[in-house]
Structures are given as structure tokens and as C-alpha cells.
Amino acid sequence: MQRELDRNEQLARLQARYCGRGRVGKGRLLDEFCEQYGYERKYAIKLLGGGIGSRGGSDGGPGPEPKYGPVREVVERVWGAAEQLCGKRLGPALGLWVPHYERHYGRLLPVQRKLLAQISPATLDRLLAGCKARGVRRLSGTRPGTLLRQQVPLAGEVWDQGRVGFMEADSVAHCGKSLAGDFVWSLVYTDIASGWTEGRAVFNKGAHGVLEQTRDVEAAVPFAILGFDFDNGSEWLNWPLIRHLQERTRPIRLTRSRPYHKDDNAHVEQKNWMWPRQLLGYGRLADPTVLPQINALYKEAWGPLQNFFLPSMKLVKKWREGSRWVRRHDQAQTAYARLLASGQLEPQQRRRLRDWYESLDPFVLAAEVERRLRPILRPARREPASQSQSSLQEEA
């Protein structure tokens, strides 16, 4: 017992000497301590620094108290309303959401403001590690259109990704477990330079419906469309749409991707998850009466929330190292910020965009999305499970 007390007293004296020294002095003391007692250097650092045996963590384990505990609730609320962004996107989004957060949940303390300003993406991911969820992949509904392939050339070159107005388009099937029968399709339109995205819905992706919604998108985007790229689906390769885009004073440049090469439309393909899938899921939407509700949701709530308040990252460069690709992305920005920074908008377009942005509240938009989504998804939840099984049997 006396030997144990002497040992603890000696350790306490060594710890006091260690903490009172500079870097060089600590190194010399560590050398002597390891040589005399035979400890590994890392263990000796913890022992002299007071790390072994301390119970400072919030969970009773070793380590200091969590630094970002005061802002955990703020981060979780913003993350939940901002469609569960990753840390690299959530960091820039906090600066956009926090002013509106105070309007809904009360003023933040100075220490909370300081912590939110310096929190890193990795720390955000650690704070939210217990809240993450996974998605799944389902069926593809692209059916090739062959009549106009010769009239629309393949995209043989990379478009200027710094010039606003070159868009990619794609369609997403809300078919559930079967592509048989009639159901709703989402149309997604993405500007390559800014990431500005619009979504519309049609029933059975007929040429007339796709043309009508494309016209509506052209009138809604805050810039002129210069180019239009799509896949080989029959909803895009049809005469009504081609005539609309080509028979004008300044025709829109048209290109199509190579068959079975989704990477040719990578910008819009990645938006398929962020837009219709994240919002409407993978269930079957077979009721045509929900079309006006989906289009209103896309235009009035989901679109403004995505384009003005949810930052995204763009690939800057990539290179191959052995068997793997290494990618580097830029700082996450919203499509609205990219448009303003491009310097390619007319003064009137910039003023209209700023007025639109200042009239919006992201928490109100997020609540509006939830409110409008319930009546849209309610019919899909009432669909009998046996119906999906019978459709699969018919296909077989």
C-alpha cells in the first residue's frame, strides 16, 4: 500500500513537471521517463498528460467535455429541415439558415454563434452520425426513341461548364415495383454551370405533356436556355419537342447522350436523387389527379428550397492513382449564389432573383413541403400490396 502511494506521489510530481515545461523540455522528460520505466512513448504521453484514468467525457469515457454540445440541437434542427445534408454541404448552409432559425426558435447565445461559425464538416458528420439513413435503387424506365436519332447528334464534346444556360434533362419513373400500367413521371432539368434545377411531373410521359412542362420550365428559369442535352428516351426524341426548341430565331443547341451511358448526363442524374427520389420516394403514383399538386410542390416549395438554401458541390478535377479515381470538389454553394457569381445575368434578372431570395424563409419552405407532400403520398400508401404482386406476376 505504501509503495502504491509513493508511486502515485511520484507520478503526480512528474505530471506537474511535464505540464510546466515547453515542447523541448517535455521531450527530454519523456525520453528519461521511457528509458527509466520502459513505457512506450505514446502511453507515457497519456500518463504524464493526465489522460489515463481520467473520466472527463460526457459519456463517462476519457477525454475532454464535448466542445460543440451547445449547438447540437441547432445543428440537428437545421439538418432535419435542410433535407439531411452531408457535413460539407451543411457547413455553408448554416450561414443561410441560422438567421431564419432565430425567427422560429429564439435568439442564439454568443457562444453558440461562435461555435457555429467555426464548426468543421467532419465535426458536423460526427454530431449527426446517429441520425443518418440509407436509400435504395430501383427500376429504370428509359425506353429508346429511334425515329429522331439522326436529327439529334451525340454529345461529342464537353459543354462550357462555366457558361449559364446549358441544361441537361432526364425523366424518373414513380412506378413502384412494376413498370406496367399508367403512373406519374418526374422531369428534371439541371443547368450545368450553376446547378439550378427545375422539376415537373407528367402522366405517362407523352410528347404533349413533356412539351408543355418544358415550356413552363423555360419561362421559369432566371436565364436563357442555350443548350439542351437529354438521353435517348422517346419522351425527348419526338417532333413536337424538337420543333419547339429548334424552330425559333435563335435555335437551342440539342445533343443526346450515348445509349446506356448514364455518365453522359451526370449532372442531371445526380439530381434525380436530390429531387424526385428524396421527395417522392420509390412508391407508385398512379393517380393522375395528383399531377397539379406535384407541379405546385416542385415550383412553389421544393424548387426554391433546393436552389436558394441547399448548397451543392461541383467536381473541380479528378485523376487516377493506381486502380482508383481521386476527386476534388469546390466549396459548397447554392445555385442562387453560383448564378450571382457568374456575372452572366442581366441587371433585371439579378434584381428579380434577389427579391425572390429575400422573400423566402427556409423553415417555412420545409414545413410547406411536408404539408403539400401528405395528400400526394396518401393514395400511394393506400395501394394494396397484392396489386404490386399481381403486376410482377403479369410481367413474368
Image (cartoon, helix red, strand yellow):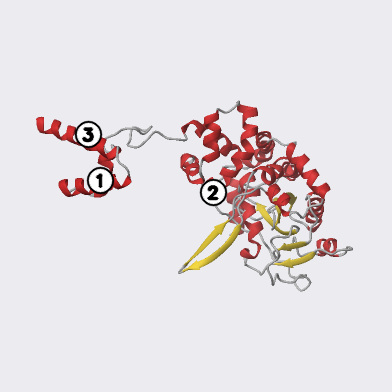
Q: Are marks 1 and 3 in contact (CB under 8 Å)?
A: no
Instruction: Answer few, some or many: residues within 10 Å of disc 3's Cα (few below 14, many 20 plus, some between 14 and 19).
Output: some
Q: Is residue 82 visible?
A: no
> Closer to the N terminus: mark 1 or mark 3?
3
Where does the image place residue 13, in percent across and percent down from the top left?
A: 21, 34
| Count of numbered labels shown in the rendering | 3
> Tag 3: residue type?
Ala
Residue 194's quadrant in the figure? bottom right
Frontmost of labels 2 and 3 is 3
Instruction: Answer few, some or many: residues within 10 Å of disc 2's Cα (few below 14, many 20 plus, some between 14 and 19).
Output: few
Residue where numbered disc 2 is placed:
135
Q: In percent of the image, x 57 and y 56: which residue is there?
A: 329
Instruction: Answer few, some or many: residues within 10 Å of disc 1's Cα (few below 14, many 20 plus, some between 14 and 19).
Output: few
Where does the image place residue 187, in percent across and percent down from the top left?
A: 72, 53
Residue where numbered disc 3 is placed:
12
Of 55 and 14, nearer the camera is 14
> Quick one: quadrant of the C terminus?
bottom right
Where does the image place residue 145, in percent across and percent down from the top left?
A: 73, 67
Which residue reaches farthest left? 2
- Dot 2 falls on a residue whose secondary structure is loop
Number of the label disc, if any, that sits on residue 220: none
> Closer to the N terminus: mark 2 or mark 3?
3
